[in-house]
Image: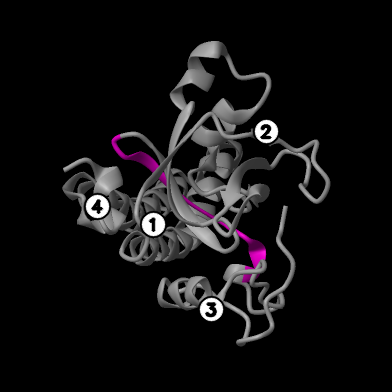
Amino acid sequence: MHPMHLLTAWDDPATRRAWTKLLIGALLGQILWPAAWLGLLAWYVGMSITWTLWLFFVPMSYAFYRTFLQWAYWRSAFRARRLLRHYPWQEYEAPESGIGNLPGVPDGYAWLRFPNPEAPAQPVTMVMHSHLRSVWWGGRLGRRATTERKAQVRKIWFAGDPRFAAVIAVPGPRHLYVIHQRSSYHPGIPADGGGAGPQALELARRAGVRVPAPGCSGPVAG
């Protein structure tokens, strides 16, 4: 059965395989980046030559940074799984997108717009707040992207609710990415329901998203 016709994205075997690859990537990073940092550190100590610090400083710093960043990859993978288990895939043809140059969107941040499920004429803007795995997307959504690169994201699979959070991918699915409103996962930001009704709020809650208390949904983001 075509993935678009299934009850949830998780019912698609290819989607489960894509998510497994996402998890394996997080696992390998958890092993390889600390090993790389320790190996470089041990090599430097063993060399005992001061000037070699400049040769190792950049790779050591980056490996150290990635070591402490890996928890975010785990978090992103499990957020994706919850969303995929509750929302079906939808396919959008050439949704409006760009990088910066939009009110409320920081310079250099990629964004896309999707229809509001309860008011399709009111598009909702979603920003790629996290740089985790966003480099591939950012290189294809901006105006400077080549025609070939733009063609790679002409069709986008979407599983979620743009007022809260979603998993986006290119057909396959490939290049899974969790895109979300900042209030959906940040306790320090008041939860905004985006005008969602009770059923949409409950579905988002079961998918692991922070939602406002009943009767407190806010205006549509966009």
Which callout, 1 or 3, points at the residue further toward the start of the chain? 1
Furthest residue toward top: 147
Q: Residue at x 41, y 71 (%)?
A: 207
Image location of residue 188, percent across then percent down: 70, 78
| Mark 2 residue type | Gly
User: Distance from label 1 to label 3 (Cα)?
Assistant: 45 Å
Residue 6 numbered tag: 4
Magenta segment boundaries in residue numbering:
172-183
Mark 1–mark 3 CB contact (< 8 Å): no
Label 3: state its secondary structure.
helix
User: Distance from label 3 to label 4 (Cα)?
Assistant: 23 Å
User: Distance from label 4 to label 1 (Cα)?
Assistant: 40 Å
Q: Nearer the viewer, residue 141 or 26?
A: 141
Which callout, 2 or 3, points at the residue further toward the start of the chain? 2
Residue 34 is a magenta residue: no
Mark 2–mark 3 CB contact (< 8 Å): no
| Mark 1 residue type | Pro
Q: Nearer the viewer, residue 117 or 166?
A: 117
Q: Residue at x 57, y 73 (%)?
A: 197
| Residue marked by disc 1 | 34
Label 2: state its secondary structure.
strand
Mark 2–mark 1 CB contact (< 8 Å): no
Image location of residue 146, percent across then percent down: 57, 14
| Colouring convention used in this rendered image of the protein | one colour
Which callout, 3 or 4, points at the residue further toward the start of the chain? 4
Residue 98 numbered tag: 2
Label 4: state its secondary structure.
loop
Image quarter of residue 112? top right
Residue 179 in the image: above or below residue 204: above
Image location of residue 18, percent across then percent down: 26, 46
| Residue marked by disc 3 | 198
